[in-house]
Amino acid sequence: MNKTHEAMWKELDLDLGAHEALLTVLGRFYNDIYLSQSGRLQGMEYLDFVMGEVHGLRIREIQEARSAGRKVMGLFCVFVPEELILALDGICVGLCAGAEAGFDAAERHLPRNTCPLIKSFFGFRLARLCPYTSSCDLVIGETTCDGKKKAYELFGDFQPTYVMEVPQSKSAAARVLFRTEMDRLRETLERLTGRILEPQRLRDAIRLVNRRRSALNRLAALRAAEPAPISGRDALLINQVAFYDDPVRFTETVERLCAELEERVQKGEGVAPPRTKRILVSGCPMAVPNWKLPYVIEGSGAVIVGEESCVGARHTRDLVSEQAETVDGMLDALCDRYLRIDCATFTPNPERLDNIVRMARELHADGVIHYALEFCQPYAIESKKVENRLAAEGIPFLRVETGYSLEDIEPLRTRVEAFLETI
């Protein structure tokens, strides 16, 4: 353990022994899943470095920024408008939420049959294992499912928490509600940061986040090439790091990766042989270090060519209009963009079905694997509509429901291998 980091972690009140054990396990896990791959892009070395220092140098950067007066906001959902935070000189970070660490502590407050994502972010905090959560001046939640909105009520006992209401439909009335929530969040952030939202700063923030989304969309489009030029594991990692890294540095890195990918596509090079079965993964988000399903799919001889997920296309698909000149006009544009997200929280939600079919066609996917976390009712229930639509389109479909435990990895592998044989 780096002793410099150890002092910082101690200041953040982490459980040093448990944290060291966690990082040791995650290091081995990362080596087995990522560093064991062949044919990786040279540019992935930066992502490997970021993951190696994800609780180290990046946290130090954040602490230095806090010392300079900047505020840190922890986000758990793609509905929270990063542009507002950045425009007020805030820092956005994702929360630790992809492993079973801290589940015992979380289950003293939450039902056992709570979704693993919720138990994980709660457990990481209670077990004092996440330096990102410990660095937050405010955690910003949202009401995208009953589990999260009720968990935030309890989470607020341990850390300053703000909950943004997300409507459940896309009606005119729902749009009014969400636009009001934009104003309420703006006022909260202005009070916290001591700044006033200025038009030029908001315009710059919109352009920055649009540039990052555009870079990730460019990368996603390149995955349509045959043979696949990047593994699904590496593409997922890139999308995961987007929630943690400095947005300017990260965007420049992805743009360089895309240039390297374009050269690979032009040469007809790939990470898997031509005619390898191509899979689109659809459904719930995969937070670091939730890499189980991609590892199983690609370890079974397929290649993942897209993620219809909040850690994937749902996060990056749409850009914010840059035409508005006033703060109110830009807030309208933000509201319109974020309401185009096709989360399963919405009812009805036909846009998501259309987007899954479009992605499958554009990426030349041979089949779709729909991933739902255990006890995630919105995605688990909506998977039936996805199945019916894909059946009508003649696209092979497999429904998977699992958690963070590795105990079911072999049964999961058997199901995936059987599905790949059918296509």
Image (cartoon, grey):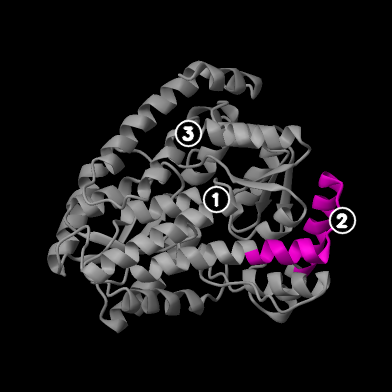
Query: Residue 266 at what x, y percent from top left?
Result: 26, 71
Q: Is any atom of residue 386 visible in this view?
A: yes
Marker disc for residue 249: 1
**Magenta-tinted stretch:** 179-207
The answer to whether residue 199 is above or below residue 12 is: below
**What residue is at 64 percent from the left and 24 percent from the top?**
12
Quarter holding the N terminus is top left
Pointer 2 residue? 196
Which sits in the foreground, 338 or 157?
338
378 vs 233, left or right, is right
Q: Secondary structure at mark 2?
A: loop
**Marks 3/1: CA–CA distance:** 15 Å
Which sits in the foreground, 376 or 200?
200
Query: Residue 422 at what x, y percent from top left?
Result: 14, 68
**What residue is at 54 percent from the left and 46 percent from the top?**
245
Query: Residue 130 at what x, y percent from top left?
Result: 55, 32
328 vs 3, left or right, is right
Query: Residue 18 at what x, y percent from top left?
Result: 48, 20
**Residue type (three-letter) at the residue carrying disc 1:** Arg
**Residue type (three-letter) at the residue carrying disc 2:** Ile
Q: Secondary structure at mark 3?
A: loop
Q: Nearer the viewer, mark 1 or mark 2?
A: 1
Pointer 3 residue? 53
The question of residue 350 being in magenta is answered with: no
